[in-house]
Image: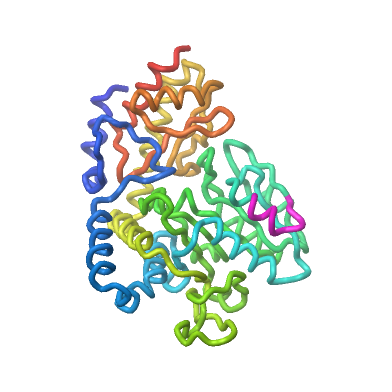
Amino acid sequence: MTLEDAHARDEADPLAGFRERFVVRDPELVYLDGNSLGRLPRATLDRLEHVVEREWGERLIRGWWEGWLDLPVRAGDLVGELVGAGPGQVVVADSTTVCLYKLAAAALGRDPGRTEVVVDRSEFPTDRYVLEGLASDLRWLEADPVEGVVPGAVADLLGPETALVVLSHVNYRSAAVAPLEEITGLAHDAGALVLWDLCHSAGVLPVGLDAAGADLAVGCTYKYLNAGPGAPAFLYVRRDLQDELRQPVWGWFGRRDQFLMEQGFEPAPGIAAWLSGTPNVLGLAAVDEGARLAAEATIPAIAAKARALTSYALELHDERLAPLGFTVGSPRDAERRGGHLSVCRHDARALCDALAEAGVITDFRMPDTIRLGCSPLTTSFAELWTGVDRLCRLAPA
């Protein structure tokens, strides 16, 4: 497989033109870490300049009444379209950690007779830590480290005391995709709710929250939605659960008629009740732009390129990395794989450092994994080929 072959794939790529709509300061840098932090959209530069100079600089406090107040819900509807949620069920706010705390605490308060939480032991640390601080009875799922969560293993842990199942739709280490609809159905049969972490699927894969009957979900916006470091997260609450569940972090932005400043908390109608403190307007503007860009490209087209890129990375692994002692840490079935491919070798940490020195940005995950992030709107096939080529030169057998 040659660089010329990679260029030919780029020429046939219907999304290739989107790369020009992002800031690429150093064309020689190979960036394979968009699954951790996406590149900066050029439209976001213009939008933030407008927000700072015009909306804040000129309009000052009037900005709240001229569009800022409802931005969390408006941006939420845009993100909702990308994850298969109808209007009024997604709001952009807080961090993933805070959003997950809100939803998990609300689910645990739904039925005092149910105290168990099922969670994958390989779940992202934030999710595990929040649940360890909240729940008195955790039931740990021991999923396959490469193939990920399977429905039968979840079913084995469900019981009459199960309140909540918390799982990532795409595993952060292996990129294994969990069968969201099937697992949701199993939890419902047991009388439990499911909270899905969409951090590694929002903006890169079809999710279909409404179609699956999903209950709750959280996700970040700084990966495939390209909203920038520390950008606000989002949470989803299915419409019929919004009045049933008790939002645990009351704040004045989640109150009905907030500017009356009245005594006592009365939740705002709908998804706005899940807001707490003052929204991050600059971050919300960046989320808005990133979501619009993904919507323009369309999730089916983005997902198709993600499969093509990670499949190409797998081919490159088998041809060039496997002879050097690497193994694949992601599912080989493209339909069961998210937007990155993990390759493993005992010296992965040192290789990641060496790659950075050679102008290739990847990331390392304990104990032996290099994640090759393939962000469909910005990663080219030639960029991926070059990154693997440099890795081969740095990794003697």
Q: At 49% across and 66% down in the image, what residue appears?
A: 210
- In this rendering, position of residue 9 left or right of residue 277: left
Chain part drawn in magenta: 129-139
Q: Is residue 137 above or below residue 175?
A: below
How many discs mark residues in the rendered view? 0
Residue 387: say if magenta: no
Q: At 56% across and 49% down in the image, what residue appears?
A: 178
Q: Residue 306 appears at what percent x and percent y? A: 38, 43
Q: Residue 335 appears at what percent x and percent y? A: 47, 44
When asked about the image quadrant of residue 246, the answer is: bottom right
In the depicted view, which residue is nearer to us: 9 or 345? Answer: 345
- In this rendering, position of residue 281 left or right of residue 18: right
Q: At 34% across and 31% down in the image, what residue appears?
A: 384
Residue 135: say if magenta: yes
Q: Residue 14 appears at what percent x and percent y? A: 24, 45
State the quadrant of the N terminus.
top left
Q: At 40% across and 31% down in the image, what residue appears?
A: 313
- In this rendering, position of residue 390 left or right of residue 99: left
